[in-house]
Amino acid sequence: MTSVLIDDHLLRDVLVGETDDETVVLFNSAQLGTTNMYYVRLSRSVVAARGGQLTGGWPASRRSALGRALLVLPEMISVVPIRSLAYRMAELAARHRLSTLGAEAVAAAELTGAALWVRESDDGPGIRAACVAVGVDYHARSVTSG
């Protein structure tokens, strides 16, 4: 089974069932995972609702439903423990000038052998270049939902 590590936007889309048909097929045939920082960033968006791309324009009832889903993630979605990533994150951050979020994403994908998928709007040259350097399969996904 293929492993896919997804960012907070794609995690949101999966949890609320707003993925296009191609994404559904791709992710249904994969073991999904995310990172601690993506998980926290999505949770903060649900709680704070200060605008922004994740959930800022959503009504309170919709954010609340997503919050419930975040509290009890489906078994099909794992969160890579930061304990197993911390040292590698520090190495990647130093070598590739990545943020903590970026270093965690690359380290988690590298550790699990997963492809890293981000929403196209989150595509950044730093994470992309670090993935290439360490041999992580990286994809920026254009989606029509959200």
Image: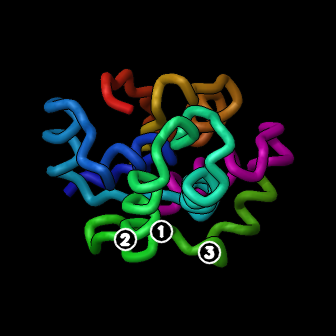
Residue 2 pos. (x, y %): 25, 52
Residue at x 78% of width, y 44% of height? 99
Q: Verify CB contact (< 8 Å) between mark 2 and mark 1.
A: yes
Number of residues whose C-alpha sits closer than 10 Å to that of mark 3, classed few (under 14), some (14–19) or many (20 or more): few
Residue 79 got which mark?
Answer: 1
Residue 82 pos. (x, y %): 64, 71
In this rendering, would 104 be left or right of 142?
right
The residue at which mark 2 appears reads as: 73
Q: Nearer the viewer, mark 3 or mark 1?
A: 1
- Compared with 74, 88 (above or below) is above
Residue at x 78% of width, y 38% of height? 96
* Callout 3 secondary element: helix
Nearest to the observer: residue 110 or residue 51: 51
The residue at which mark 3 appears reads as: 84
Q: Amino acid at mark 1?
A: Val
The magenta stretch spans residue 104: yes
Q: How far separated are the C-alphas under marks 3 and 1?
A: 11 Å
Q: How far separated are the C-alphas under marks 2 and 1?
A: 9 Å
Q: Verify CB contact (< 8 Å) between mark 2 and mark 3.
A: no
Q: How far separated are the C-alphas under marks 2 and 3?
A: 20 Å
Q: Which residues are magenta?
A: 92-113
Residue 19 got which mark?
Answer: none
